[in-house]
Amino acid sequence: MSAFIHPDFKLNGQSYGLLELLALALQWSKEGMLYEKEIGNFLLDWLNNETHLMVTTSGSTGKPKKIYLSKSAMKASAEATASYFHLQPKDTALLCLSAQYIAGKMMLVRALQIGMHIDVIEPSTMPLQTLTKSYDFAAMVPLQVAQSLSDLSKIKTLLIGGAKLQPELVSKLAQLPTQIYETYGMTETITHIAVKRVGESNFSLLPHVKITVDERNCLVIHAPFISEEAIVTNDVVEVCSPTQFKLKGRWDNVINSGGIKIFPEELEDTLSAYITSRFFIAAQPDELLGEKVILVLESAPFELDNSVFEALTAYQKPKAVYFVPTFIETPTQKINRPKTLELISR
């Protein structure tokens, strides 16, 4: 498989042919800063003659694992994103995510495939603070976005992924001129297969993606350009149309309390209007109910007013509240719920 570099592709303002880019990748992989090593290592893997490359999942819903992705599928994913967002050769892009994970890798693939002019900077919580340039396209995680509100006007189209956006942040983002999209996807789907404008309820599918649901009402993704086989997820959804769906929560998070199925994510959406610190909803075994709802807060202990729970039913209302000084996170800064729950059982 011969590597393709679009003739308009630029990295940090410099044009590269195959040999020049390989030389840069080798140099960065050996002598660069950590983020440059990650980019260099990816480029060396991308530009070789192998048809697949190995990537690591984020570990947000389980132990991180290594999987192989087809390079042709990654190229097709890049083209689908370009089609949806009307990305063109010479459009400018910013990579401020780690190239160790799929979201960062795909920013580079899009640039190489479409011919974008991409700048790479060291990932940080405030990536836009010192930048003087503006960009057509970028991707960030919610933490970066929350710390960059005053600078987001430097980005024309921004993708946000990796974790759920809190309602308070959504309301702030909705007032900005930047076109901001939440993404739905995972490593297995080669980043996103659906997006929604910030503040909207439903995700819209990228071109050539079809969806169904299984007997659990979990999303099944049919995207031949990504995978010959259907990708069965653990995400419970409501299909709104052939091209749109609403995400309800994860099947493996569902709480069965007294025979009532409760999705923690829906409770978290409701409570986020009243709780300012980070928190999540989980379950504990209960002799009477089978499972009981609990609330875990990242905070020093304090007295929660009962009015916080007024919008919840009796089954939904947490039967216990736990305080954890600092949540355990995955390498991509998502809350590691299983590991954090282990802290309260000690």
Image (tube, rainbow, N blue to C red):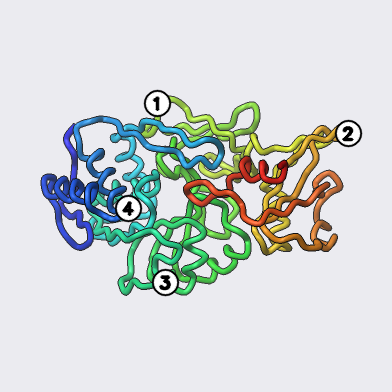
Residue at x 82% of width, y 49% of height: 317
Under mark 3, the amino acid is: Ser
- State which tag comes first along the sequence, 1 or 2: 1
Q: Is residue 294 left or right of residue 242?
A: right
Q: Which residue is mark 4?
A: 34
Q: Name the foreground residue: 318 vs 198.
A: 318
Under mark 4, the amino acid is: Leu
Q: Which residue is mark 3?
A: 153
Residue at x 74% of width, y 40% of height: 283
Q: Is residue 8 left or right of residue 148?
A: left
Q: Residues within 10 Å of mark 4 (few under 14, many from 20)?
A: some
Residue at x 80% of width, y 46% of height: 316
Q: Which image quadrant is residue 67 in?
A: top left
Q: Which residue is mark 2?
A: 288
User: CB of mark 1 within 8 Å of CB of mark 2?
Assistant: no
Secondary structure under the numbered disc 2 in the rendered image: loop
x then y, percent, for residue 245? 57, 43
Q: Residues within 10 Å of mark 2 (few under 14, many from 20)?
A: few
Nearer the camera: disc 4 or disc 1: 4
Nearer the camera: disc 2 or disc 4: 4
x then y, percent, for residue 158? 42, 60
Q: Which residue is mark 1?
A: 228
Residue at x 38% of width, y 58% of height: 123
x then y, percent, for residue 182? 50, 54
Under mark 2, the amino acid is: Leu
Residue 83 visible, this angle = no
Q: Gap between marks 3 and 1, in whole Å?
A: 40 Å
Q: Gap between marks 2 and 4, in whole Å?
A: 52 Å
